Image (cartoon, helix red, strand yellow):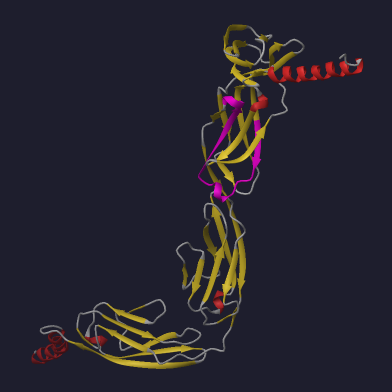
Amino acid sequence: MELPRTHLCLLVFICGIIHTGWSQKQCEVQVVSTQVFAPFDEWVLLNCTYTCSKPSWESRLRKRNITEGDHWVSTEVLVNDWETSRISCISEDEENVLESIVTVAAYALPSKVTIDLEEELEEGQRHEVTCTVFDVAPLANLKISVIREGTVIRTLTFAEDTVTGKQTLSESFYFEPSRRDNLQDFYCQAALELGTVGDYMVQSKKINVKTFARPQLPTISIKPTTAKEGDSVTLTCHSEGLPEPEYSWELPTDAHVTYSEDKSIINIAKVTVAYNGKYLCMAKNKHGRVREEKFLDVIKNPGAQPDTPFFMVLPGETVKEGDSLNLTCRSNGFPEPEYVWIIPSKDRVSFSADKSKIFIRKTTSAHNGTYACEAQNTHGKVRKQVVVKIIGQPNGSFNTRPATILLPSVLVFILALL
């Protein structure tokens, strides 16, 4: 039975579709890697697989060593051009040309990487670090990073760069160092990312950074904020800096003032109106000096008259002639009492600066007697006394005085006889 002409055409069309689909399914060609990197002026191996007719290689780069296997064919090409090359693996069937493309690019690892960064950086200020990468290609695959102790702090890439051939590239980064950067290692790193070949990294030398901070304007605190005569007062000066600042002061008076070990704190055990005035604190390190001042205003107290003095006699109230003797008189009052002594003899007697003590280096019988101490201020006067007895030495001063007294009588008697 003869098919109608229209049916015959339809059958031919369907068979054509089936045949075409079968051919496309069965005929394939594929390069093993679609992107290949190789060192400049070196040979690189390319592979291609196929399922139908044997393919051929088309390349503007020089080829050698074309090798065939079971449904594969390979070749080597000389990568001596900095421009990226498109190399085709081409196969044909009865109706179609099949093509698979691999891009081949030359690369050059950096010959060296350097870092330019000051070793001393001021905290909070903007500082520049420059990384230089020498003789690298391609730039589009380059990544430059600044690293602090293994942590990346800045990165720059060049994906849009189309420059070909080996280049030397310098890039600057800016950052503000902090205290955590002190004594940390900084370095630059160049990474060349080469796809399936892997990533190549070259690092610069490391720079151990020392951060510093100029002293900040000091703050001075006074406790208690309202001081009365007789109060204990503390003044504290504080400044931030790196290294830690050293402190010094200018005071209205330094009498009875004590300092903390680092001199940032002043203690006044008993303040008087003499401590009124300006207290100037200076903070400095090797990078700078700052100063601040604050006024201390002491409120005058109504005052208090002296207490009955405390007496101390050393070595005791009975002393051998020729020994030393010290007498101390102390009294509490406000203002601080002054001292006046009434003593039996002022021969070879020394006083302390505030007259509260008497020093006798070598006693004689002339130091026998009553020693009275008067403590006085504007609110009153009190008195206390002690009797000191000097014991003579045997064959000592007791035998010399009578001889001195009898000598005139003997002379008168001799003259009478004449």
**How many badges with numbers are in the image?**
0
Give the farthest residue toward the front.
Answer: 1
**Picture residue at 58% right of the left edge, 14% below the top:** 44
Q: Position of residue 15 (x, y in %)?
A: 80, 17
Q: Is residue 87 above or below residue 236?
A: above
Residue 181 among those drawn in magenta: yes
The x, y position of residue 364, in whole percent, is 22, 83
Q: Nearer the viewer, residue 156 or 235?
A: 156
Q: Which residues are magenta?
A: 171-197
Q: Is residue 107 visible?
A: no
- State the image quarter where residue 126 is shown: top right
- 208 within the magenta span: no
Q: Quadrant of the N terminus?
A: top right
Residue found 61% across the figure and 65% down from its top: 293
Residue 120 percent location from the top left of the image: 55, 42
Left-right relation of 9 to 307: right
Viewer-closest of 303 and 25: 25
Q: Is 50 placed left or right of 312 in the picture?
A: right
